[in-house]
Image (tube, rainbow, N blue to C red):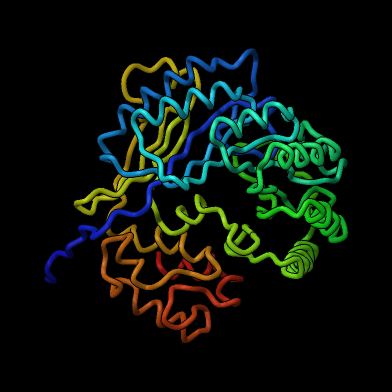
Amino acid sequence: MPPPEDTAVSALPPLSLYVHVPWCVKKCPYCDFNSHALTGDIPENGYLDAIMEDLAGDLAFIQGRPIETVFIGGGTPSLMSPDFYNTLFDRLRTHLSFTDDAEITLEANPGTVEQTRFIGFRGAGINRLSLGIQSFNPMQLKALGRIHDDKAAHRAIEATRKAGFDNFNLDLMHGLPGQTPADALDDLRAAMSWQPPHLSWYQLTLEPNTEFYSRPPQLPNDDYLWEIYCQGADYLHQQGFTDYEVSAWSRPGMASRHNLNYWMFGDYLALGAGAHGKITFHNGDIRRFWKTRQPDAYMNRIGSRTAGSQMVELEERPLEFLMNALRLTSGVPENLFTERTGLPLSRVAVKLEELRKENMLEPGRIQTTELGQRYLNSLLERFL
């Protein structure tokens, strides 16, 4: 029997913070996130207190590690007032340290935009917005159940720029009900007219427990989907964008640092109803956590808001690492596998070499070829 492996990590990975705001104006028919349509006023003070009690239960896990990126997702976080975020960050800073250049992103819905609100978010320390545009086509926005139209989408981007946000993301979907390749390209052209530094561009999928899953709309066929992707990718490359991840595009130097930490198997503290986190410990343990999902139950719970946790076992780590790292088109250096999993590269070396011989992976690096990226799911199945 071989000796047990020493899985203690030599250095802990970067630490991010995810904060979940679970409320929205209306639940979209494709959305499988933990979002709840509002039936009254948002209990900002009660939710803020619950977040801070949630944090108190997690502080021992991070032992003073600095926060390098923050992402506030939802739901619709832009429904909360600037005062909420001012108070939130004031209180967080009494317990957490943030790097001087921390990237702090807030998701915003174009249907909830007010110029003064965006200026207030900027004043609260938020330095990056992610706008849930989805499409600039009024018919497709209606089919998606969005509360905004194309004019509101353009107003939201204008408000973002006027509020001083030089770093922002436009979130666009393709493969929408009734969408043609020409429609999809028009969406990208509309987005590029604003010269965004970053674009999330991904295909609509029908997820379980959504209205679209139970009553599927008519979506483009596979030939259309491939044409939409190919022409869109060509266009974005012509515009100076790089697809640094399967669905993330950026101008040079503007990739989302928060997303990169996820894909590189970094750590993230999680606060808020239904939030999920991952923490690596000095002894080599890696544990995932998830918080109480229902907003009222989260706020009313006494003590810890953690609903459950699970160790990432040694045999699970190679696949978990590769499922993330191989989404990055430039991949990661081989030594990162050991740094982030605590396991020797020999755990996966034989399969990596097999895939290189099949032209699925690049030599000397954990990185897909163009062929490997196209058949990424099949590639990952080799590590099951």
Give whichever of 221, 349 is nearer the camera. Answer: 349
Q: Position of residue 133 (x, y in %)?
A: 74, 43
Q: Is residue 367 above or below residue 277?
A: below
Q: Position of residue 101 (x, y in %)?
A: 47, 47
Q: Quadrant of the N terminus?
A: bottom left
* Image mark count: 0
Residue at (69, 34) in percent of width and height: 109
Q: Position of residue 380 (x, y in %)?
A: 47, 66
Residue at (52, 25) in percent of width and height: 86
**Residue 107 placement, left or right of 268:** right
Q: Quadrant of the C terminus?
A: bottom left
The answer to whether one can see residue 109 in this image is yes
Q: Residue furthest bottom?
A: 357
Q: Is residue 288 above or below residue 187?
A: above
Q: Position of residue 45 (x, y in %)?
A: 50, 15
Residue at (26, 70) in percent of width and height: 344
**Residue 308 placement, left or right of 381:** left
The answer to whether one can see residue 202 in this image is no
Image quadrant where residue 329 sits: bottom right
Residue at (79, 33) in percent of width and height: 148
Q: Is residue 172 above or below residue 382?
A: above
Give whichever of 42, 289 is nearer the camera. Answer: 42
**Residue 229 placement, left or right of 31:** right
**Residue 331 placement, left or right of 312:** right
